[in-house]
Image (cartoon, grey):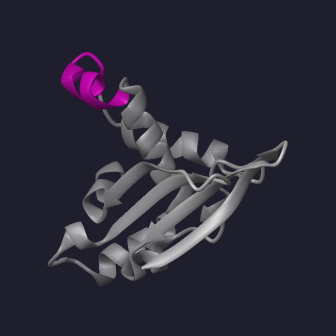
Amino acid sequence: MIEYSNLISEEDGYKKFNHFEISKELEAILADDYFTYNTNNFLKKELVSKLYKKNFIDKYNRDTQKEIFSLYIDNKKFKEKAEFVYSIIDIEKYINFVNDNPEIKNPAELTVKYSILDSEGIKVQIYNLSIDDISFVF
């Protein structure tokens, strides 16, 4: 398991941190700058929007596939989760990973956990995603 924390903000001595817990096997698909997610240094907002548009909005027809729009595309929480995946996973590395691993025996064991920590020691888990969740948005 890889663990990494990165400062998000600091105001009047109160600090907030990104905290990632990632299965070692998924290290190969991480974007080089994954830890900048949710910080002022995050530079991939345009790429994230393009990926969401390509993989969901442009891929489905609102008139004939209303259920997909209702369950996923128009669901704010789903969109946030998909955008999180696009923010931390490098698409080219992911494609290579899929080609090298056509079958995964225990997908539930390959996880990315994202939490927010603060200087008070409080940890709030935001996402607990498996490789299945990651695959779904690609």
Q: Can residue 54 be seen by looking at this rendering? A: no
Residue at screen point 25% across, 72% down: 109
Going by the picture, which residue comes out furthest to the left?
105
Residue at screen point 41% across, 82% down: 24
- Is 64 included in the stretch rendered in magenta? yes
Residue 88 point in image, percent of width and height: 54, 60
Relative depth, front residue between 16 and 94: 16
Relative depth, front residue between 16 and 72: 16
Q: Which portion, as a residue range, is magenta?
A: 61-73
Q: Specify the quadrant of the image occupied by residue 78.
A: top left
Q: Can residue 44 be seen by looking at this rendering? A: yes
Residue 15 point in image, percent of width and height: 73, 51
For residue 116, above or below residue 31: above
Residue at screen point 21% across, 70% down: 107
Q: Quadrant of the N terminus?
A: bottom left
Q: Main secondary structure of the magenta part?
A: helix
Q: Quadrant of the C terminus?
A: bottom left
